[in-house]
Image (tube, rainbow, N blue to C red):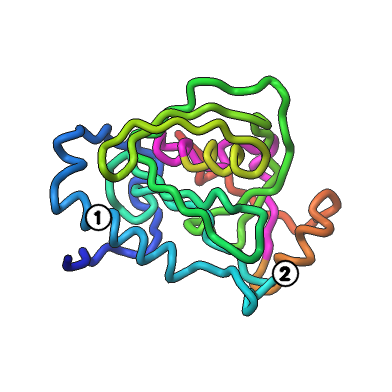
């Protein structure tokens, strides 16, 4: 199957609500090519295994609108937090239908906003419904980092970025190339700020 040539992560359409995908569309050759092209980007940026660069972020999630495709598709690595393996899931029309009241506060970044990070509150556990790439209905009960990742990607499909959830968008964290490991250790006392107010949902 030939790959579609799709753009690398870009900022066009990030604040637009993505379109729901029909079952008939899922089964088309064109739709499957979109998924294969997205997988090429995910695998091409994968940063796990014995040769992992700890100063470089891993690509653990990618939603279609991050690469200029207006469809409700997310690819998530539910092996997040494990440095040696990937556990990739292709989710079509993912819907979070239950959120725990218990929250987790963690740093988040995005391939569309290089060098920008921030601390975000998310539900510790979520329950999700979606279709797989064959059109089968699937359900996931996710906790911890996997739950955070899924919420981040569903936000993308709804036209929202993690910076839209920051308490103070004038104090997002600037994390330059090579500083990620240092940042994750000192995130609560990080004082290299960047104002992202102009990038928020209008």
In the rendered structure, which disc, 2 or 1, sits on the residue that comes first in sequence? Answer: 1
Q: Which residue is at 44% across, 52% downward?
A: 62
Compared with 149, 30 (above or below) is below
Residue 171 shows in this picture: no
The residue segment tinted magenta is 154-175
Q: Position of residue 117 (x, y in %)?
A: 65, 53
Q: Secondary structure at mark 1?
A: helix
Query: How many neighbours does mark 2 have within 10 angstroms: few (below 14), some (14-19), or many (20 or more)?
Result: some
Check disc 2 and report the residue beneath it: 179
**Which residue occupies the foreground of this view, 108 or 101?**
101
Check disc 1 and report the residue beneath it: 34
In this rendering, which labeled residue sits more in front, label 2 or label 1? 1
Q: Which residue is at 39% across, 65% downward?
A: 41
Query: How many neighbours does mark 1 have within 10 angstroms: few (below 14), some (14-19), or many (20 or more)?
Result: some
Q: Which image quadrant is residue 177 in?
A: bottom right
Is 161 positioned to the left or the right of 138 in the image? right
Specify whether residue 172 is painted magenta: yes
Q: Which residue is at 82% across, 59% downward?
A: 185
Q: Position of residue 45 (x, y in %)?
A: 48, 68
Q: Position of residue 163 (x, y in %)?
A: 58, 43
**Quadrant including the N terminus:** bottom left
Specify whether residue 182 is painted magenta: no
**Circle number at residue 158:** none
The number of numbered discs placed on residues in the rendered structure image is 2
Instruction: Measure how far apart labels 2 and 1 are at the Cα level.
Output: 33 Å
Q: Position of residue 140 (x, y in %)?
A: 50, 33
């Amino acid at each position: 199957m030939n790959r579609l040539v799709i753009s690398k992560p870009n900022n066009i359409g990030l604040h637009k609500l993505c379109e729901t995908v029909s079952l008939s569309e899922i089964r088309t050759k064109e739709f499957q090519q979109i998924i294969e092209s997205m997988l090429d980007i995910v695998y091409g940026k994968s940063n796990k295994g014995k040769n992992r660069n700890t100063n470089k972020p891993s690509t653990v999630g990618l939603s279609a609108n991050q690469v200029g495709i207006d469809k409700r598709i997310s690819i998530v690595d539910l092996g997040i937090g494990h440095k040696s393996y990937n556990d990739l899931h292709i989710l079509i029309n993912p819907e979070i239908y239950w959120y725990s009241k218990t929250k987790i506060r963690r740093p988040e970044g995005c391939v569309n906003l290089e060098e920008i990070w921030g601390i975000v509150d998310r539900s510790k556990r979520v329950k999700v419904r979606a279709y797989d790439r064959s059109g089968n209905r699937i359900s996931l009960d996710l906790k911890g980092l996997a739950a955070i990742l899924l919420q981040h990607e569903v936000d993308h499909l709804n036209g929202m970025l993690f910076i839209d959830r920051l308490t103070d968008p004038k104090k997002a964290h600037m994390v330059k190339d090579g500083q990620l490991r240092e940042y994750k250790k000192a995130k609560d006392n990080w004082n290299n700020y960047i104002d992202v107010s102009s990038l928020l949902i209008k």
